[in-house]
Image (spheres, helix red, strand yellow):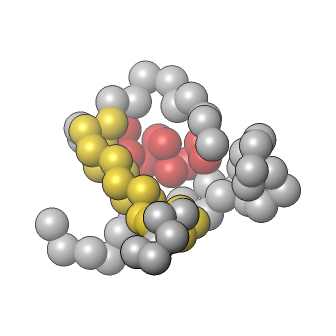
Amino acid sequence: MSRAVPCRVVLWLQVMRDRENNTSRGFAFITFVNAPDAEAAMGQLNGTTPQGPYQGKPIRVSPSNRPR
């Protein structure tokens, strides 16, 4: 899946994968350089429908509960 987010700088990205077959588990963690960029990206992408293998499934974007 590829989706451009204009003017947002990603510091780190980790796609979560299944241990047994190395396929995507359907979610990822993304760290942006600053909070305003993260909030803007969440607002732009939440509820959109990607093209490609996940076509037809809306993206749900939310902040992580995971401690940093």
Q: Residue at x 56, y 48 (%)?
A: 43
Query: Can residue 20 be seen in the rendering of this structure?
Result: yes
Q: Is residue 16 left or right of residue 5?
A: left
Depth order, front residue of 43/21: 21
Q: Quadrant of the N terminus?
A: top right
Above or below for 21 versus 35: below
Above or below for 67 versus 34: below
Q: Residue at x 49, y 42 (%)?
A: 41
Q: Residue at x 43, y 23 (%)?
A: 7
Q: How many marks?
A: 0
| Residue 10 point in image, percent of width and height | 33, 36
Which residue sits furthest right?
56
Above or below for 4 versus 20: above
Q: Quadrant of residue 14?
A: bottom left
Q: Is residue 20 left or right of residue 10?
A: right
| Residue 35 point in image, percent of width and height | 29, 46
Query: Can residue 49 be seen in the rendering of this structure?
Result: no
Which residue sits furthest left?
68
Which residue sits furthest top?
7
Q: Is residue 68 left or right of residue 29?
A: left
